[in-house]
Image (spheres, rainbow, N blue to C red):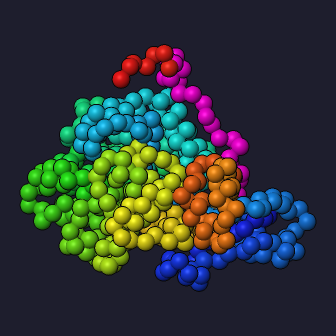
């Protein structure tokens, strides 16, 4: 039996912090340790105690003075948009047509899908994210590429083939029947295999006909243990267009409600322009709104009003939304979340932030028994954070006096350089991460770029 004892400053949440000094919501061990046996957590607590109880064959890895946290969880992003991040100058609908729908067509090539899937998983890990829920492209091969890359790394990943049968280029459109058939086959192949979970993925109301929505309803009814993911109310023009396509719906949320797609396994990206009625409909069905701060700023969409979701009792999670989002880093994402809320007069405490990236997102996915916190029996997905990873951080840390301050500095100034190691099911991953150049980029150089 393989045994690892990770020594460092251990931080893990047991509940949502209600304020900056709600110390009951987390456990913190200054000279702490996590004992890992066969990919699972077998002990969490003070180092001296755990070291005494561990067998003679235990391997000790000393991560001091770094922090040991659960691996981060990202609840919404797009794996085929890995090379579309930072596409200039357009809001949502123009951005989709100009950049995203061009990029996603490349995923008809299995070689391309395999290459990007590997880089995508490694980029998540480089940033300390050990689990995520992502959209694949319309091509079923992209789902095979995605789950194969996750399986190779033993990562708990959620994903699915995007379904879209209108308002997209021909090469990216399925049909209600082929979307149904491909989704069924992919669920049979991947859902529950190892650590894989399937997400039924009608992209959004604009790219699905009523017939495809009907098919989505059937899929969800036939596979109640699968996730469902879509987009909702991200951008004002999108809301106008989507509701015009479904004139009998009360509002945008009602489109999905009318096809019985809302529920505790449904994650809806963005939710920026919802009425109180719509938020209440999400609350009643226990659906999850996904806050995507870097994306909402980058695409000029709008500001997520977290306090209205809280007031109306609706669930929410947080996500990068790569490639509308601009970073794979959940730390950078929370730095922007802080600003999005701050500009609306809402507070995001450092403890609340780290809760959201870990246990909060695990609860949104209903996976809190497996991931998102360091507890005995959980999967050993663990992130090691270095608060002094950059010279400017090291300098700033010289004046920090509390854990809350350190966490806030790490979030505000940190990125992938702050992740000194990441463990997936107890296996260290950071040193093996891939930075291979894309096959299609091999012949390009700066000299090939056109002047603006
Ligand atoms: N709405 C529908 N598709 C997408 C997408 O790929 N990204 C974002 N940000 N919004 C969407
Ligand atoms: Zn999205």
Q: Is residue 262 above or below residue 178?
A: below
* 86 with respect to 399 (left or right): left
Give the quarter of the image for residue 232: bottom left
Residue 95, given in percent of the width and then of the height, sits at: 29, 39
Pinpoint residue 203: horizontal percent, then vertical percent: 30, 49
On screen, residue 257 versus residue 66, left or right, reads left
Q: Which residues are magenta?
A: 423-445
Residue 87 shows in the view = yes
Q: Residue at x 43, y 19 (%)?
A: 449
Q: Is residue 210 magenta?
A: no
Q: Which quarter of the figure has residue 32? A: bottom right
Residue ID at (51%, 67%): 353
Query: Is 193 left, or right, of 383 in this rendering?
Result: left
Seen at 64% across and 59% down, the residue is 396
Looking at the picture, how far across and down is residue 325, in whole percent?
41, 48
Q: Residue at x 24, y 31 (%)?
A: 170
């Amino acid at each position: 039996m393989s045994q690892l004892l990770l020594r460092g400053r251990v931080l893990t949440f047991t509940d949502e912090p209600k304020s900056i000094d709600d110390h009951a919501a987390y456990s913190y061990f200054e000279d702490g340790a996590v004992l890992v046996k066969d990919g699972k957590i077998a002990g969490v607590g003070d180092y001296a105690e755990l070291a005494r109880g561990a067998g003679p064959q235990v391997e000790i890895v000393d991560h001091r003075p770094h922090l040991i946290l659960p691996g981060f969880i990202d609840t919404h992003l797009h794996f085929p948009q890995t090379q579309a991040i930072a596409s200039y100058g357009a809001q949502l609908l123009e951005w989709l047509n100009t950049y995203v729908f061009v990029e996603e067509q490349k995923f008809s090539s299995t070689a391309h899908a395999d290459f990007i899937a590997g880089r995508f998983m490694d980029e998540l890990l480089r940033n300390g994210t050990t689990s995520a829920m992502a959209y694949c492209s319309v091509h079923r091969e992209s789902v095979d590429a995605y789950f194969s890359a996750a399986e190779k790394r033993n990562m708990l990943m959620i994903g699915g083939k995007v379904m879209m049968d209108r308002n997209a280029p021909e090469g990216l459109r399925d049909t209600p029947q082929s979307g149904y058939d491909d989704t069924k086959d992919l669920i049979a192949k991947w859902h529950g295999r190892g650590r894989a979970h399937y997400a039924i993925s009608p992209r959004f109301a604009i790219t699905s006909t009523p017939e495809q929505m009907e098919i989505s309803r059937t899929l969800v009814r036939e596979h109640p243990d699968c996730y469902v993911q879509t987009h909702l109310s991200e951008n004002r023009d999108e809301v106008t267009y989507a509701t015009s396509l479904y004139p009998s719906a009360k509002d945008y949320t009602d489109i999905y409600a009318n096809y019985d797609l809302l529920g505790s396994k449904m994650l809806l990206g963005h939710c920026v322009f919802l009425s109180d009625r719509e938020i209440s409909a999400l609350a009643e069905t226990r659906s999850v709104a996904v806050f995507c701060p870097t994306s909402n700023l980058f695409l000029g969409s709008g500001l997520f009003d977290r306090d209205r979701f809280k007031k109306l009792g609706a669930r929410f999670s947080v996500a990068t939304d790569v490639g509308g989002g601009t970073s794979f880093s959940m730390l950078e994402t929370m730095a922007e979340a802080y600003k999005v809320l701050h500009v609306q007069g809402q507070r995001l405490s450092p403890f609340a932030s780290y809760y959201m990236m870990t246990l909060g997102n695990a609860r949104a996915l209903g996976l809190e028994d497996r991931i998102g916190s360091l507890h005995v029996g959980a999967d050993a997905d663990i992130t090691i954070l270095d608060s002094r990873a950059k010279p400017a951080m090291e300098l700033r840390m010289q004046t920090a006096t509390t854990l809350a301050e350190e966490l806030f500095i790490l979030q505000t100034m940190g990125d992938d350089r702050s992740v000194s190691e990441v463990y997936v099911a107890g296996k260290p991953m950071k040193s093996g991460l891939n930075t291979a150049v894309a096959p299609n980029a091999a012949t390009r150089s700066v000299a090939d770029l056109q002047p603006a």
